Image (cartoon, rainbow, N blue to C red):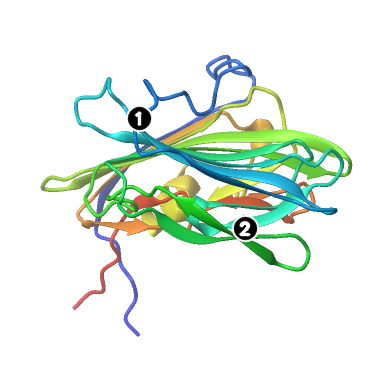
Amino acid sequence: MRPVVFPLAFLAFVLLVPASSNQVGNQGDDICPPCTRKTDPPAKTGSKTDQDVNFTWYADADQQTDNKDGSYCYVRYVRNQHAKKPLNFDWPLGRLSSPRLSPGGLSRFCTTYQKPKNPVSNGPLTYGLHNEQVTTQVWEGEDEPPAKTGGISVRVEFDLYEDGRSDRVALEFLSRVILGVQQVYTYEIRNRMPHKVPYKFIWESALSIPFLQEMKRRSYPEFPIDLSKFEVLKIELVSDAPPQLSAKGLRIYDSKGHLAAAAGVPAWVPRPTTPK
């Protein structure tokens, strides 16, 4: 088998700001700012309540009337309304998953795409210890995941439960590629919560070989990234390789190294090529 090679011109910069910095927004900032106004199509929602679970799912798409490109903001969430028990759920269509969403907690995914597909997409939300399912409906963008290059912006948040304690993890991701004689790949990750939380994360979608090479060159700590010490990371890569979409997603781990949550956060990466 021939080795995989990324034609790479140079790797530009990485910026890591420690958690003590004041650049992060206030704790009260909304991780998913509301759209300009409610527009069609109508939101889809449902709930499940029995002796073991009590939760609501929600999916909406509203046109951003203040944007000239006519884009829509998409909001999807699962809210655990049980007062005592954490919720174990997996919602592929909503791009969200967690084995222990906190009692009373929220899991939310927010992004921007063009107008929604019609008809609405249907798919299961699996929950509980016995993998029971409810049917859900989600408005997906016509360009979701994006087929054309451009910017991908996603915000996620999870209220996570461990050892009787609930912590909120809130992260913002940006992936952009500008085409030219050489392609410019830009990545940005922001921790939206100013307090320290005992969780770590890996944005697996972004982990191309050039990305990892730059992290190593900068002597960046090994993955997963510790949220108790992290605020913002910016990386810019310049590469001869054309872009391809990576949809491996985001994974969040607790202090014991167990998977605590996951979300479908894609990224543009340089396409690997094999030498002739």
Please state the horizontal and vertical placement of residue 33, each as a whole percent of the image.
Answer: 47, 23
> Which image quadrant for residue 169?
top right
Mark 1 or mark 2, whichever is nearer to me: 1
Q: Which residue is mark 1?
A: 39
Q: Secondary structure at mark 1?
A: loop
Q: Secondary structure at mark 2?
A: strand
Q: Which residue is mark 2?
A: 90
Q: Residue at x 25, y 24 (%)?
A: 67
> Which image quadrant for residue 82?
top right
Left or right relative to 153: residue 200 = right
Residue 211's place in the image compared with 178, above or below, is below
Q: Quote the CA–CA distance across marks 1 and 2.
A: 28 Å
Left or right relative to 83: residue 119 = left
> Which image quadrant for residue 240?
bottom left
Q: Residue at x 77, y 46 (%)?
A: 255
Please state the horizontal and vertical placement of residue 204, each as a whole percent of the image.
Answer: 50, 55
Number of numbered callouts drawn: 2
